């Protein structure tokens, strides 16, 4: 069954489906024909019938209008119907019109004129001749415009290098299939090691490989070799996409994909060089795996990357859990490598007092993967925590931060506060205090420059030991900040027992603070509690001037947020210190 389905629906047909707008229904064709036939039938009747219609005008005046006066109106309506037929139905409309005029109307009028000597048909004869000229002009003008439009559209949906449909065509088709609620699988395809070919053999050679792959896959998509209905496209670079329809089960998708894999893996010979290409395929199915075009594409992309990382499996279906696992493993590997090569860096985000004077900085870890793409701490810190690598990250950032303070001490008279994040498990380590002390000694930095940020969870996890360590840190002169305050489960009594110096109100409260009066009161209450407990209060993630105004009004002490400063590389942070000095 799937084969028949496929035979009459090639890639070209699919492309036409997605680029040509809504078609005019054939019922409109019939309607226009009727609009033509009925008035033309009555035209002759009214033209030759001597009857009149009495029309009452305003003021009660009655006028007799002869039937013959309606002949012109009816002819115009009939001819208008013919013109619409040509405009809306192009070739078929034009042929129908020409047949009606040339094979029927004109001969019958000529016969009436010549045989019956009916001179009243002369006007109609000319009208029909003019209509014929008019529809012919309309038809050819329309045809020219259509051709131009088709050329523009086909350029917009075609990849220049390979002539395959492009990214735009793919998203149009996906949108259409979703609109029609048709089941399909979207596959992202990444050619392995293509960059090496480009780098070693040059771009022209690389282009030839891409064209060869495109030709093989186009031929396959248009053949009967797969039992599914396939649409192959090039998204750019070495990325291709495949949309598979008309399958019965997932096994059938995989069988089709195997055929594309086999086609790709046949030796590619270009300029007497043999190449053996491979690729990773990731797919997501509509509607099972995702419901929107974005979700389907990003699901397939994630699956494709996961397939690449796993190595053993060239095809993967979108599965959030499996992908998360694969990604975690990859992030873990990147962290380990960065620790080995000492490539973990840091940014410094400025903190200000409420009158916009620099208070200090928060040191934030930064990690890049091998391609130089930043991985956010939101992603790598949880992985580092789970795998026990976070202590080493903390230590690395701590060292960079202390070193920065020593430079500030040497170059300026500024008395900045340097905040560092320390994970709970790191703080709980027996040698934590010693580590901190050694580091400060190594760089000759007094403890009062340093503030250690911990999260509320420490108060629940292991209170006594935590309190003990924190007390020791405080005794050394280090300040303690409670990070992300308000998001954990701390009770007032915990807070009272913990010897801290500053509360950091979490961004989530600041975000909604100005939405309602009660949100504002909530933040105001945290500030008051902080002050009652003799703590300073800093708001995190402050992004707008309105938020600054409110925080001033409710007496918050410090501000950290994009509104006054984003995390900066150390050199830029140093310039800020020098400026403020
Ligand atoms: P955090 O300690 O609460 O740090 C503040 C985060 O909020 C930073 O994100 C900062 O860039 C972001 N931020 C500050 N102001 C704004 C703002 O106005 N708008 C927005 N949208 N964001 C703002 P980042 O650098 O991505 O760090 C995220 C989290 O990762 C940190 O949250 C912290 O919990 C953790 N982290 C970062 N570096 C380290 C580290 O060296 N060690 C440990 N253990 N955790 C770290
Ligand atoms: Mg923090
Ligand atoms: Mg925070």
Image (cartoon, rainbow, N blue to C red):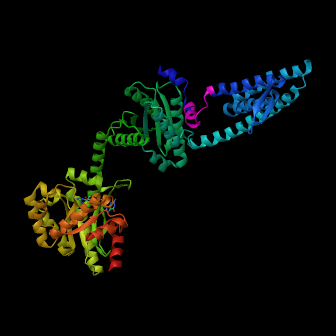
Left or right: 446, with 544 as reference point: left
Coordinates of residue 427 in the picture (x, y in percent): 15, 60
Determine the residue positioned at 49% across, 40% down. 171
In this picture, which residue range is highlighted in magenta? Answer: 12-27
Q: Is residue 472 above or below residue 4?
A: below
Is residue 210 something one can see in this rendering?
yes
Magenta span: predominant SS is helix
The magenta stretch spans residue 15: yes
Coordinates of residue 39 in the picture (x, y in percent): 74, 26
Q: Number of numbered discs present?
A: 0
Determine the residue positioned at 21% across, 50% down. 387
Q: Quadrant of the C terminus?
A: bottom left
Query: Residue 46 lies in what quarter of the image?
Result: top right
Viewer-proximal residue, 493 or 476? 493
Q: Is residue 223 above or below residue 205?
A: above
Viewer-proximal residue, 208 or 485? 485
Coordinates of residue 267 in the picture (x, y in percent): 48, 35
Left or right: 240, with 92 as reference point: left
Q: Is residue 257 above or below residue 578?
A: above
Viewer-proximal residue, 141 or 427? 141
The magenta stretch spans residue 238: no
Is residue 425 something one can see in this rendering?
no
Which residue is at the far front? Answer: 60
Left or right: 279, with 119 as reference point: left
Left or right: 166, with 297 as reference point: right
Viewer-proximal residue, 74 or 81? 74
Query: Residue 303 lies in what quarter of the image?
Result: top left
Coordinates of residue 358 in the picture (x, y in percent): 30, 74
């Amino acid at each position: 069954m799937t084969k028949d389905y496929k035979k009459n629906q090639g890639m070209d047909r699919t492309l036409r489906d997605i680029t040509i707008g809504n078609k005019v229904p054939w019922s409109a064709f019939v309607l226009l024909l009727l609009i033509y036939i009925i008035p033309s039938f009555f035209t002759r009747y009214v033209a030759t019938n001597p009857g009149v219609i009495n029309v009452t005008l305003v003021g009660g005046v009655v006028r007799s209008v002869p039937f013959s006066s309606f002949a012109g109106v009816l002819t115009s309506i009939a001819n208008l119907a013919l013109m619409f037929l040509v405009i809306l139905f192009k070739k078929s409309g034009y042929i129908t019109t020409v047949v009606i005029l040339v094979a029927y109307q004109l001969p019958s009028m000529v016969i009436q004129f010549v045989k019956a000597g009916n001179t009243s048909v002369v006007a109609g004869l000319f009208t029909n001749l003019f209509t014929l000229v008019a529809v012919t002009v309309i038809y050819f003008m329309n045809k020219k415009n259509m051709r131009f439009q088709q050329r523009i559209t086909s350029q917009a949906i075609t990849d220049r290098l390979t002539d395959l449909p492009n990214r735009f065509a793919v998203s149009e088709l996906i949108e259409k299939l979703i609109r029609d609620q048709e089941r399909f699988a979207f596959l992202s395809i990444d050619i392995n090691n293509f960059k090496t070919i480009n780098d070693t053999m040059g771009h022209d050679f690389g282009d030839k490989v891409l064209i060869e792959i495109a030709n093989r896959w186009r031929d396959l998509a248009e053949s009967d070799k797969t039992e599914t209905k396939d649409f192959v496209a090039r998204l750019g670079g070495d990325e291709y996409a495949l949309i598979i329809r008309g399958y019965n089960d997932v096994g059938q998708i995989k069988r089709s994909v195997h055929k594309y894999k086999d086609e790709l893996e046949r030796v590619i010979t270009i300029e007497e060089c043999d190449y053996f290409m491979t690729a990773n395929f990731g797919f997501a199915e509509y509607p099972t795996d995702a419901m929107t075009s974005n979700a389907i594409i990003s699901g397939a992309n994630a699956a494709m990357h996961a397939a690449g990382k796993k190595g053993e499996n060239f095809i993967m279906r979108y599965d959030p859990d499996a992908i998360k696992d694969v990604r975690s493993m990859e992030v873990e590997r990147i962290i380990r490598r960065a620790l080995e090569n000492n490539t973990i860096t840091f940014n410094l985000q400025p903190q200000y007092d409420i009158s916009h004077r620099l208070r200090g900085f928060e040191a934030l870890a930064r990690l890049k993967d091998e391609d130089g793409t930043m991985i956010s701490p939101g992603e790598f810190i949880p992985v580092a925590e789970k795998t026990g690598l976070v202590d080493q990250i903390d230590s690395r950032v701590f060292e960079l931060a202390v070193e920065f303070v020593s430079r500030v001490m040497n170059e300026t008279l500024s008395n900045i506060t340097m905040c560092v994040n320390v994970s709970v498990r790191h703080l709980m380590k027996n040698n934590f205090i010693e580590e901190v002390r050694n580091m400060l000694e190594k760089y000759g930095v007094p403890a009062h420059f340093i503030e250690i940020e911990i999260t509320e969870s420490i108060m629940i996890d292991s209170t006594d030991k935590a309190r003990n360590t924190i007390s020791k840190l405080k005794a050394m002169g280090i300040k303690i900040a409670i990070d992300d305050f308000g998001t954990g489960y701390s009770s007032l009594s915990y807070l009272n027992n913990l010897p801290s110096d500053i509360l950091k109100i979490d961004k989530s409260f600041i975000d909604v603070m100005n939405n309602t009066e009660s949100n504002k009161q909530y933040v105001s209450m945290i500030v008051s509690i902080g002050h009652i407990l003799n703590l300073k209060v800093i708001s995190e993630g402050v992004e707008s001037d309105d938020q600054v105004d409110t925080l001033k009004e409710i007496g918050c002490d410090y501000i950290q947020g994009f509104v006054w400063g984003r995390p900066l590389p150390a050199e830029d942070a140093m310039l800020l210190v020098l400026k403020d000095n």
